[in-house]
Image (cartoon, helix red, strand yellow):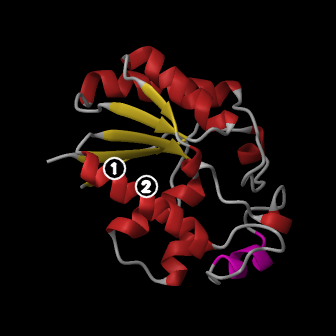
Amino acid sequence: MAHLYFTRHGQTIWNVENKICGATDIELTDAGRRQAYELGKILVKEIHDIDIIMYSPLIRAAETARIISDITGIPLKEERILTEQNFGKYESTARNGKEFAASKTHFADSYDGGETMLHLAQRIYNLLDEIKTDGKTCLLVAHNGIARAVNSYFYDMSNEDYAAFGIKNCQIIRYEL
């Protein structure tokens, strides 16, 4: 049975500053590069069934994926569908802002120029359907918003659970396809 692995990119300065990165292209910190390197080492030691790394084109995910690939030798494929959700007016604002927290539970909200949760889920679900039929074991390297959509593909979640879901930088989750 094929698996799907998901990881969030390494740390960025906006993660440190508690800001929403969204579709804004923010680079990794040195700590973020070390996190990616450590994850690559873990994969070499513990996980041997990944056929391909698919990654978001945003620099923080692309660099994380390249570091992992350099260590593991797993081939890379850029996947534009994995680009983080555009949070519109909330880009660069506090991640724990009350208005943003409320908006994340409104799935048709486009954040004044961003992307709705519904549109995000559609593109991610379509990609996951393709991966499922392909039969390859993939590691997706993307973002926290993408992590929510991926998790909701595999598990039932309330709107509140969906909005609150998140993973740490370079944390890895395994899903059964």
Q: Amino acid at mark 1?
A: Ile
Q: In this orientation, which residue lies closer to the viewer: 114 or 164?
A: 114
Assess whether residue 103 is covered by the magenta stretch.
Answer: yes
Residue 11 horizontal/vertical position (percent): 64, 38
Helix, strand or loop under label 2? helix
Q: Residues within 10 Å of mark 1 (few under 14, many from 20)?
A: some
Helix, strand or loop under label 1? helix
Could you tell me which residue is drawn at 39 percent across and 39 percent down?
139
Q: Amino acid at mark 2?
A: Leu
Q: Residue 10 vs residue 40: left or right? A: right
Q: Give the residue pinned by disc 1.
A: 131
Q: Residue 77 vs residue 113: left or right? A: left
Q: Residue 66 vs residue 71: left or right? A: right
Quadrant in which the C terminus appears: bottom left
Q: Give the residue pinned by disc 2.
A: 127
Residue 149 horizontal/vertical position (percent): 49, 64
Q: Residues within 10 Å of mark 2 (few under 14, many from 20)?
A: some
Assess whether residue 55 is covered by the magenta stretch.
Answer: no
The residue lying furthest to the left in this view is: 1
| In the rendered image, the vertical position of residue 146 relative to residue 102, given as above or below | above
Is residue 2 in sight in this rendering? yes
Could you tell me which residue is drawn at 43 percent across and 61 percent down?
126
Residue 33 horizontal/vertical position (percent): 61, 25
Q: CA distance from mark 1 to mark 2?
A: 6 Å
- Determine whether label 1 and label 2 are within 8 Å by CB: yes
Give the number of the disc on residue 24: none
Q: Splitting the image into 4 quarters, where does residue 160 fall? A: bottom right
Span of residues in magenta: 97-104
Q: Residue 16 vs residue 141: left or right? A: right
Residue 43 horizontal/vertical position (percent): 33, 28
